Amino acid sequence: GEDVEQSLFLSVREGDSSVINCTYTDSSSTYLYWYKQEPGAGLQLLTYIFSNMDMKQDQRLTVLLNKKDKHLSLRIADTQTGDSAIYFCALKEDNRLAFGKGNQVVVIP
Amino acid sequence: GAVVSQHPSWVICKSGTSVKIECRSLDFQATTMFWYRQFPKQSLMLMATSNEGSKATYEQGVEKDKFLINHASLTLSTLTVTSAHPEDSSFYICSATRENENIQYFGAGTRLSVL
């Protein structure tokens, strides 16, 4: 099955950019996702990218996909305190999702 | 659109009792629903996949008699934790997908505490 790795913790000052990284092993995934989880809540889909794309931008969010290195990143511009959460990358594997362990982002005012 | 509602959000029960958790797609028909379990500071572990009108497919190591899943309609799936014990205490999250769409929409989760 898919093995998805994420770094565990990131702290960033309000207004700076955050970059969260994810690496994976199975290159056959067609869809790659970023989800956000706030404390005690479910997962909110932030954005996703199709495997034939290299980049996708959606307002403050930029997703970069490097298929050669099997590396996915999420950049949050102008990070706000409301961006403090755990961010999961996930890859579509058949009809299910393979999740990373999550990256906690703490925004310092 | 694509709102998934999960109920209850938090339940406390005595050991040995059964608890039912509901997952509803409010504004779409869910062809497939998924049930996950999440331990503190951990990722989501898929427990089972259910399609309307058919038996759920359980992941390896998940006891189907312990975690009963019913997907009676295109908008409702239920997870019943039977004879709950303290080790079943966890955060349970459901998700749902629409036909011909590759996105899972998640509920807000249910925190189960078994005393």
Image (cartoon, coloured by chain):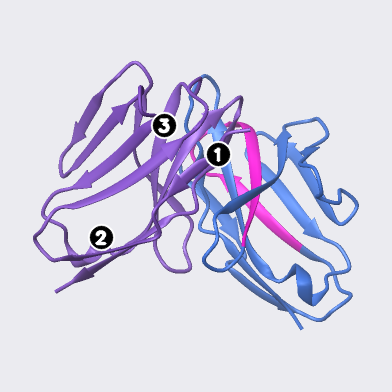
**Mark with earlier residue (3, 2):** 3
Q: Is residue B1 visible?
A: no
Q: Label 1, label 2: how many angstroms apart (C-alpha)?
A: 26 Å
Residue A75: quadrant of the picture: top left
Q: Quadrant of the N terminus of chain B?
A: top left
Q: Label 3: how many residues lie within 10 Å, few (<14), some (14-19) or many (20+)?
A: many
* Mark drawn on residue A3: 1
Residue at 46%, 21% in the rendered image: A30
Q: Label 3, label 2: how many angstroms apart (C-alpha)?
A: 20 Å
- Colour chosen for chain A: purple
In depth, the one of A28 and B19 nearer the eye is: A28
- Colour chosen for chain B: blue
Which residue bears the numbered disc 2? A83
Question: Which chain does the residue under circle 3 lie in?
Answer: A
Residue at 50%, 41% in the rendered image: A4
* Mark drawn on residue B24: none
Q: Quadrant of the C terminus of chain B?
A: bottom right
- The amino acid on which the numbered mark 3 sits, given as a three-letter code, is Leu
Q: Do pointers 1 and 2 mark residues of a single chain? A: yes
- The amino acid on which the numbered mark 2 sits, given as a three-letter code, is Asp
Mark 3 vs mark 2, foreground winner is: 3
Query: Dot 1 lies on which element?
Result: loop
Taking the image as shown, residue B46 lies to the left or right of residue B85, namely left
Mark 1 vs mark 2, foreground winner is: 1
Residue at 70%, 59% in the rendered image: B21
**Mark with earlier residue (1, 3):** 1
Q: Label 2: how many residues lie within 10 Å, few (<14), some (14-19) or many (20+)?
A: some
Query: Dot 3 lies on which element?
Result: strand
In depth, the one of A69 and A61 nearer the eye is: A69
- The amino acid on which the numbered mark 1 sits, given as a three-letter code, is Asp
**What stretch of residues is rendered in magenta?**
B20-38
The image shows residue A54 at horizontal and vertical percentages of 26, 23
